[in-house]
Amino acid sequence: MAIEDYRGDVEMCCRCSACKHIPLQMVKGVEHSYACPSIARYNFHAYSGGGRLLIAKEMLNSGFKYTDKLLDIVYNCQMCGGCDTSCKYAMDMEVLEPIYEFRIRCVETGHTNPALDKVINSLRKQGTMVPGAKGKRAAWAQGMGIKDATKEKVDVYYHVGCLTSYDKDYQKLARATAKILKKAGVDFGIGYENESCCGGRAFQMGYKDDFLKQAKKNMDMLKKAGVKTLVTGCADGYQAFKVLYDKYNLKGDLEVLHITEYLARLIKEGKLKLNKKVNLTVTYHDPCYLGRLGEPWIHWQGKKIPGYKFVFDPPKVYRRGTYGVYEPPREVLKSVPGVKLFEMDRIKEYAWCCGAGGGVNESNPEFAKWTATERIEEAESTGAEAIVTACPWCEKNFNQAIKESGSDLKVYDIVEIVEKAI
Amino acid sequence: MALSKDVYKEFEDVVGAENISDDPAIKDAYRSPDLTVILPGSTEEVAAVIKLCNKHKIPYKAQSTGWMLFAPTYDFIFMDLRRMNRIIEINEKNMYAVVEPYVISAELMAELFKRGMICNVKGSGSTCTALAMSGHGHMGMTTSTGDRNDLATEWVTDEGEIVRLGTLGASDEWFCGDGPGPSLRGVYRGGGVITRQATKVYHWPGPSEYPLEGLSPRYTLSKKPSEMNMMVRYFSFPSIGKLIEAELKIGESEIAFELMGFCPSMVSSNITTSNEEDFETLEQFTREVQGPGFMVIIVGNFDEDFAYKKKVLAQIIKETDGESLKAVEDPDAEATLLFQCTRVCASIRETFRAGGMFSSMMVQGQRYDNHVRWLEEAAVLKRELIEKGLVIADDGQQFGWGEEGGHLGHTEIFCRYNPYDEKSSKAVQEWLAKVGKRALDGCFAVPSMGILPVDVIGKRASNYHIWFGKLKEAFDPNGVGENTGFSYVGADTSGVHTSIYQKPEKASPKK
Ligand SMILES: Cc1cc2nc3c(=O)[nH]c(=O)nc-3n(C[C@H](O)[C@H](O)[C@H](O)COP(=O)(O)OP(=O)(O)OC[C@H]3O[C@@H](n4cnc5c(N)ncnc54)[C@H](O)[C@@H]3O)c2cc1C
Ligand code: SF4
Ligand code: SF4
């Protein structure tokens, strides 16, 4: 698909601005009513989902004019899909897909962002989205006796992800995950140095070819290793394997589970027992790529039925954020003795982004931090002691914002809470 | 066309570099190649921008939430007021709320719900501004209409003077629009910029927050509406006469929280989550209704009040041969209609989802007899378009709602169509022109949607356009403001009619 294929969708935009806000009946007051970080921070209509479609419409009609401002608009978007969900509450049209395609067109025509180029260079050279990554990908696993899934058959392949593998501050998440899986008696392994970046964040940044390269590489490796079930703790990785690989017909019948889904399953089956009390009041942050954008891909091909209605043959079924992963992480948290869960104003399919998505943490750290700070304040307003997430990128971004704002809020990944409880 | 560097810098000095742009990408999103877009953050900045417009004789236009939806036509300085988004005050004792232009109704309503209150929400929906100054809405039966809700107002004139109207002119209070300070309520709709306004608020007997559950796009309530002393019903009638009789009786008995004269198509759009489901549901509804109808929401203050209102409603429906649409009695459908139509959060399902565009003919302020009859004529003409396959095949009817217990009302009819289909667009424009002309010729109403030239309408309406032109000259000697005032023919329809305003002749943009 290309941006041209979404002409009908961009033309449907009625400029109603629902995409700026969370679904309107969920608005609980003048605070926390926004869904889109970009419009909330930059204010010109161009930065909203609908504004982006209006630009696309104009440029499809009269040619692309790549000004600095246009690129500022394009890259100051977390690709979080808040706009898409809010619009599709009422409308039958794609919003995020054309936004992706617009960014891909920018990259294809050489209108890239230097900070993102740097990340992609690291991907091309080192197979990781962590620029300057040093050492071995699986250094964290040293001495843990974890199987190499490329050498021996395992029931579950644990895809660790770039940040968790290379960032010293977040390797704890990989270790916690391995510890939990062992405790539950799961036969699992990792790819060691054969693991490579999922490519999901490259896709979000607009580098579609790099994404496809990574996807093919990963699927070759997984097929060779005979992997049937993949589990990951990274929301971006989850969405890449489960949704994007499927979108590009690369996933085959690989079962893809986020660690929260897998833990919820293990708890339900009685294989994982959480016995230790963790006295903590928490609020849960739904990562965009696990929540609304973790919804399975729907393969559909059809044509608009000629005439005045925006309907298709065969009927188009839209991904509206309904089938993201919302309950499993909550079930896991509720299973931890002593943990009390308070919900924020913006949750599940209309959660506010952590700020790191779409490469914004690299291209505009100030905006990433601003977005995270909004979320931190929202979390604090619940009275919780900690914000719990299910993605290392969110955790890192929250920690950075907290460091500068001086908030007392603690930040955890869900596996850290579970680790405390076993 | 662009502002000279020096002039641009003068505007930039007022709002800061981050809040001004004439970049093509920004302009594309505002759908005009000729704009410099400015985002003022305060009344003082608005006044300073307008003063600069006067100094350089540059026309300007302001936007609150942009629901007018038409692209600006000639404007040069385009003030998007979205940074002015504060609720200044909610005064529970004196029953008003003071807002800036980019407070949306969803935000104000959520705050008001918590306090047992509500405000008027424009039919366009709750992403529309909560400013009182314009707009009629679904809850008009209880909350009246925009032009009856505005209280004290802070207004920046077309010359950039900050004027405080109503009680605000004599004190710090916002409770009255007409005095003891100056009252210009009939004038400020014609120009300048409203920067803060008090809107009336009303008693809300419902919950402080709806117990919503489920996931988008299919939210529902965890409680049945009846458990909250609330009920939604759709009634159809054997004739327009019976429908009007029922509406009047309901108004007189003061039992309805909301009387929304939806056609079945508007009910089906609201409760369905895709076009396909919508058209299927509509077919079913069309088979089930006996004629024109309305939706009514009853809300009890307490059990006995709820029981009484239901009983009176049942009696009225019996007397007028109304029939309840069974599908709406289903608690899930009822719940959806309840939160959607009191929080007005799915209007675009009714209007834009099906074809991408709608065009409407309406009269605001009136509903009964004359207007319903005029728009029934319009419905006959609309059905011709449906038969030719030019507009969406819905039930084709007029709709509307009662206001202030039925003393006032709103009557409307629209065609939904694909705006990129030339034949459809042309047919709809011709339909509007015909219906508008018929309104004037038949002395039914003053058409208010910018269909006919101002002087054609003005001649039939006491030459108001000439009077308004004189006012405009007095308030806007440099002609930098816009002339929307010319189209505000008595009815309060601020904003929807810019297609007929004229470019101010005196203003010649500086290069
Ligand atoms: C789908 C749809 C349904 C609608 N249904 C209804 C309905 O049921 N009832 C109804 O009454 N209307 C309805 N409308 C019209 C809509 O409610 C009005 O256009 C509304 O008043 C727009 O408010 P706004 O602030 O968003 O308008 P904008 O587009 O921001 O502005 C409208 C006009 O007012 C001027 N203006 C804006 N803000 C200010 C200000 N602060 N001071 C001075 N002038 C200002 C602008 O220059 C412009 O001329 C509907 C519109 C749509 C698209
Ligand atoms: S993208 Fe959707 S929600 Fe946003 S303005 Fe357009 S139609 Fe409305
Ligand atoms: S993807 Fe997120 S940041 Fe980008 S326009 Fe949509 S809501 Fe805003």
Image (cartoon, grey):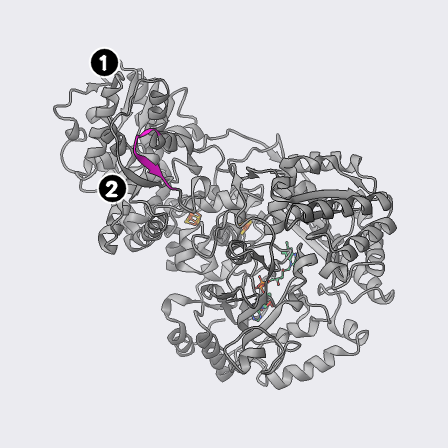
Quadrant that contains the C terminus of chain A: top left
Which residue of the protein is positioned furthest toward the front in this rendering?
B304
Q: Nearer the viewer, residue A275 or B481?
A: A275
Q: Chain of mark 1?
A: A
Q: Chain of mark 2?
A: A
Give ligand 1's quarter of the image. bottom right
Q: Position of residue A30 (x, y in %)?
A: 46, 57
Q: Nearer the viewer, residue B392 or A229?
A: A229
Q: Position of residue A161 (x, y in %)?
A: 27, 32
Q: Amino acid at mark 1?
A: Glu
Q: Is residue B225 left or right of residue A289?
A: right
Is A14 located above or below residue B77 in the figure?
A: above
Q: Gap in Å between the C-alphas at discs 1 and 2?
A: 32 Å
Determine which residue is flagged by label 1. A152
Question: What residue lies at 16% left-to-right and 26% top-to-bottom?
Answer: A141
Query: Residue B366 is drawn in which quadrant?
Result: bottom right
Read off the magenta span: A335-342
Is A64 located above or below residue B167 in the figure?
A: above
Precedes in sequence: disc 1 or disc 2? 2
Determine which residue is flagged by label 2. A121
Q: Is residue B3 left or right of residue B481?
A: left
Q: How many marks?
A: 2
Q: Nearer the viewer, residue B366 or A296?
A: B366
Q: Position of residue A216 (x, y in %)?
A: 34, 27
Which residue of the protein is positioned furthest toward the top in this rendering?
A153
Q: Is residue A384 left or right of residue A142?
A: right
Which residue of the protein is positioned furthest toward the left in this rendering?
A143
Residues at badges 1 and 2 in contact (C-beta under 8 Å)? no
Q: Give me the disc on residue B282.
A: none
Query: Residue B355 is drawn in which quadrant?
Result: top right
Query: Is residue A310 among the parts visible in the rendering?
Result: no
